[in-house]
Image (cartoon, helix red, strand yellow):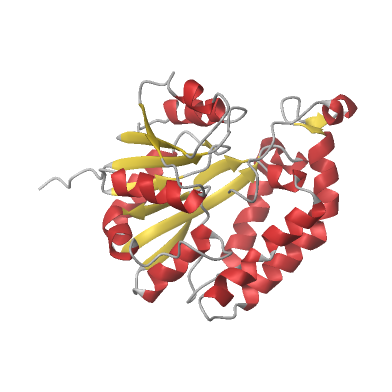
Amino acid sequence: MRKKTLTLSIVIPVYNEQGYIDACLDAIAAQSEAPDEVLVVDNNSTDKTVHLARKYDFVTILHEKRQGVRFARNTGFSAAKSDLIGRIDADTRLTPEWCAQIRRLFAAKTDIAAATGSNVYYDLPLGKKDRNLVVDRILRRMVYGVGGMPLLYGSNMAIRKSAWDAIEEDVCMEGDLYEDYDVSIHLFEKAYSITYDKHMVARLSARRLDDRPADFIKNMSLHTKTFTHHGQKNRIASISRLGYLSVYPALKVMLRFYDEDKQRISIKKAARKRSARPDASHY
């Protein structure tokens, strides 16, 4: 008997993402295997994000008035009708085989509940020819966050709808924490398995480096605060926080001067106004 093809929904929480949403949705349109539905969850945007998203006939727009990515995520996940839910950010640019790879992965590994993949930062110098993909794959094989399993990255992850239904009422909706790490911990607590798949590749923006130093430091503290919120200590989370802080100054300079279109350092690029990342206090 032929196996049923797993269906796939993609959920994208958005808040004032007019500078990124077109490239994100263009990458979905270019998938070798189309997703079964794409849910863009508007979280009170005041710019042209929703207007731009409506240009894509495969997109369904949802609205969530409660401010915060956790609320927008929940609205999208609850509305998703597929066997699998892919979760990305508005600045994520999926590689063409992403949807196909997720379907292959979950069909082959029936024991896994969720998966995360490899990330390439397209607006940093090592993004040229995907050189930082090698670095990411090495680090992700070495670093595991909970119960010997990898932590999910909200910019590049997928979860079975059945697993989400099992933890939806448990995920934390208050407190200073990373919402994707929180999902990882709740899956582990329910004995669900998470895997890392190097072939599940997404290109991301390093725009968080544009944050003011105080805001960046505050955000990095969530590596450990998320585990503390759950009454846990995690050595890897502490190392990750310190690692990001140590390279922040150098990477911030690289981001400022790197022209991703021409893939080279550019003084003119530094003078151009960047599309701002959503306010960290809201997202």
- Residue 10 vs residue 119, the one in the foreground: 10
Q: Position of residue 236 (x, y in %)?
A: 63, 73
Question: Could you tell me which residue is drawn at 35 percent across and 25 percent down?
Answer: 58
Examine the rendering and report whether any part of residue 199 can be seen.
Answer: no
Q: Position of residue 229 (x, y in %)?
A: 54, 74
Question: Could you tell me which residue is drawn at 28 percent across and 64 percent down?
Answer: 166
Quarter-of-image position of residue 135? bottom right
- Residue 132 vs 246, above or below: the answer is above
- Residue 19 vs 183, above or below: the answer is above
- Residue 45 vs 106, above or below: the answer is above
The residue at the far right in this view is 267
The residue at the far top in this view is 55
Examine the rendering and report whether any part of residue 222 can be seen.
Answer: yes
- Residue 20 vs residue 279, the one in the foreground: 279
- Residue 33 vs residue 166, the one in the foreground: 166
Q: Position of residue 171 (x, y in %)?
A: 41, 64
In this picture, residue 2 sits left or right of residue 139: left
Q: Position of residue 36 (x, y in %)?
A: 29, 35
The residue at the far front in this view is 65
In this picture, residue 264 sits left or right of residue 186: right
In this picture, residue 161 sits left or right of residue 119: left
- Residue 252 vs 52, above or below: the answer is below
- Residue 282 vs residue 207, the one in the foreground: 282
Number of labelled discs?
A: 0
Question: Could you tell me which residue is drawn at 63 percent across and 60 percent down?
Answer: 138
